[in-house]
Image (tube, helix red, strand yellow):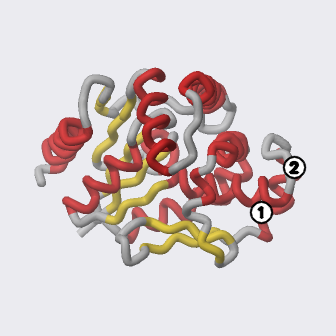
Amino acid sequence: MKPISIAIDGPSGAGKSTLARSAAAKLGYLYVDTGAIYRTIGCYAHRKGIDPKDEPAVKAELPQIHVGLTYGEDGLQHMLLNGQDVTKEIRLPEISLCASAVSAHPSVRAFLLEMQRELARTHNVIMDGRDIGTVVLPDADVKVFLTASAEVRAKRRMLELEQRGTPEPFEKILKEIEERDWNDSHRAAAPLRQAADAVLLDTSELDFQESEAALLRIIRERTGL
């Protein structure tokens, strides 16, 4: 029986990872956070002092990069960079901007594409990112474009950083989100856009439980689960 694949796309801070992870746990599916994979490449560039916007420099380093994906005892996806767990480091704001830059490079996207598709060929997956329904899994059984206003996403991000003990001012977070939105939607390689057959889910007015219920409803309606 062919595995079921669910693609969730949307802008930074829309809650894709949290919702996809929770929905995958409820459905017993493998959760794949592709943003974390790109963040791991961005982390490598940052550590090496490479300009993440310099594609030839980043491309030259790809043979030296091994990205690993494991699941810890906490049930969460852990990212390994050349064998080292970088799960916490890749969530730093400076790594977010590096990830946005490296993900614009066709060479990086090609480097990671087969890794992502192989996971979908061998597991029931919920995969989230920027171009899952448009490029990575164009034949996904369910496609959802998850979004929320920039202001709502900035407020959520501010709360998340406060809880982590690394607070940032709202204006700075909003500016970074707007900058990342522009970069992600205007890049030449696989820009962020809603697939023609994706269901739009705007969570601006929804809390987590309402957002998750809406997502699960879409998945069940489309798959007959």
Q: Nearer the viewer, residue 10 or 90?
A: 90
Return the x and y of residue 60 as percentages of the image width and height.
86, 59
Q: Nearer the viewer, residue 163 or 21?
A: 163
Question: On the picture, is 36 further left or further right than 218?
Answer: right
Number of marks: 2
Give the residue displayed 79% in from the left and 70% down from the top: 64
Q: Is residue 147 visible?
A: yes
| 208, above or below 28, in the image | above
Q: CA distance from mark 1 to mark 2?
A: 10 Å
SS for tag 2? helix
Which numbered circle lies on residue 118? none
Give the residue displayed 23% in from the left and 69% down from the top: 1
Return the x and y of residue 55 as percentages of the image width and height.
82, 46
Give the residue displayed 28% in from the left and 58% down from the top: 24
Quadrant of image for the C terminus: bottom left
What kind of residue is marked 2? Pro
User: Mark 1, residues whose alpha carbon is within 10 Å: few (<14), some, or many (≥20)?
Assistant: some
SS for tag 1? helix
Which numbered circle lies on residue 56? 2
Which numbered circle lies on residue 62? 1
Return the x and y of residue 141 as percentages of the image width and height.
29, 49
Return the x and y of residue 10 as percentages of the image width and height.
44, 35
Q: Nearer the viewer, residue 91 or 120?
A: 91
Question: On the picture, is 15 further left or further right than 179?
Answer: left
| 196, above or below 55, in the image | above
- Marks 1 and 2, the one that precedes in the sequence: 2
What kind of residue is marked 1? Leu
